[in-house]
Image (spheres, rainbow, N blue to C red):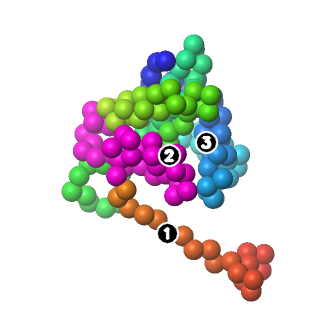
């Protein structure tokens, strides 16, 4: 297995993997619509490839995983420079072989080289396998997002 910076030509294949990632996240109540976001994500992946912020894992010449990352350019002044792992995905048949750990470590090295002092990422609350994976790689829970549906028997989206 090799980890390398992605090329623009590889962005289409990585887009397919991103759609697979988003499809998997639906079981954890993700609100992201995979196919409806394909075009926007393809553009974003191309930008990440051009700016060397996208890594791919290849086995026998085939892409089996990817990680997107960047420095946090949020609107708040911070006391640390944060790197962000935006998406990490490994095809199911290549999981539990160290691919995800290698992708994560490579993204961390890249972010360190860009000046990041910490790395943040998100995982769906119910995705216990992802949470275990990140905890094994020394990530601690730092922030929690809560959600409340405003739909009820008397108030639904259809009435809006």
Q: Is residue 84 visible?
A: no
Provide residue 114's location: percent of width, then percent of height. Answer: 28, 36
In this rendering, position of residue 141 left or right of residue 158: left
Q: Nearer the viewer, mark 3 or mark 2?
A: 2
Provide residue 28's location: percent of width, then percent of height. Answer: 61, 55
Which residue has dot 1 on it?
146
In this rendering, position of residue 84 left or right of residue 156: left
Label 3: how many residues lie within 10 Å, few (<14), some (14-19) or many (20+)? some
Q: Is residue 20 above or below residue 125?
A: above
Which residue has dot 3 on it?
21
Q: Is residue 156 above or below residue 73?
A: below
Question: Whole-Å distance between the Cαs marked 1 and 3?
Answer: 22 Å
Question: Which residue: 36% across, 32% down?
Answer: 105
Q: Nearer the viewer, mark 1 or mark 2?
A: 2
Of residue 117 and residue 71, the one placed in the foreground of this image is: 117
Provide residue 69's location: percent of width, then percent of height. Answer: 42, 40
Numbered range of the magenta stretch: 111-140
Q: Quadrant of residue 83?
A: top left
Q: Is residue 32 above or below residue 22?
A: below
Question: Which residue: 46% across, 28% down?
Answer: 98
Q: Is residue 42 visible?
A: yes
Which residue has dot 2 on it?
130
At mark 3, the secondary structure is helix
Label 1: how many residues lie within 10 Å, few (<14), some (14-19) or many (20+)? few
Question: Whole-Å distance between the Cαs marked 3 and 2?
Answer: 12 Å
Q: Total number of numbered labels?
A: 3
At mark 1, the secondary structure is loop
Q: Which mark is residue 6?
A: none
């Amino acid at each position: 297995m090799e980890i390398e910076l992605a090329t623009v030509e590889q962005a289409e294949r990585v887009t397919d993997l991103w759609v697979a990632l988003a499809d998997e996240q639906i079981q954890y109540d993700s609100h992201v619509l995979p196919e409806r976001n394909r075009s926007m994500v393809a553009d974003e992946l191309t930008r990440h490839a051009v700016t060397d912020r996208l890594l791919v894992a290849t086995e026998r010449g085939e892409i089996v995983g990817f990680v997107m990352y960047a420095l946090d350019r949020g609107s708040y002044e911070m006391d640390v420079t944060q790197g962000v792992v935006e998406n990490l995905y490994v095809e199911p048949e290549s999981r539990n072989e160290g691919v995800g750990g290698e992708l994560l470590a490579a993204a961390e090295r890249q972010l360190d080289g860009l000046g990041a002092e910490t790395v943040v990422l998100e995982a769906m609350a119910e995705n216990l396998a992802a949470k275990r994976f990140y905890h094994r790689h020394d990530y601690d829970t730092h922030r929690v997002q809560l959600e409340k549906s405003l739909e009820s028997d008397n108030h639904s989206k259809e009435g809006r």
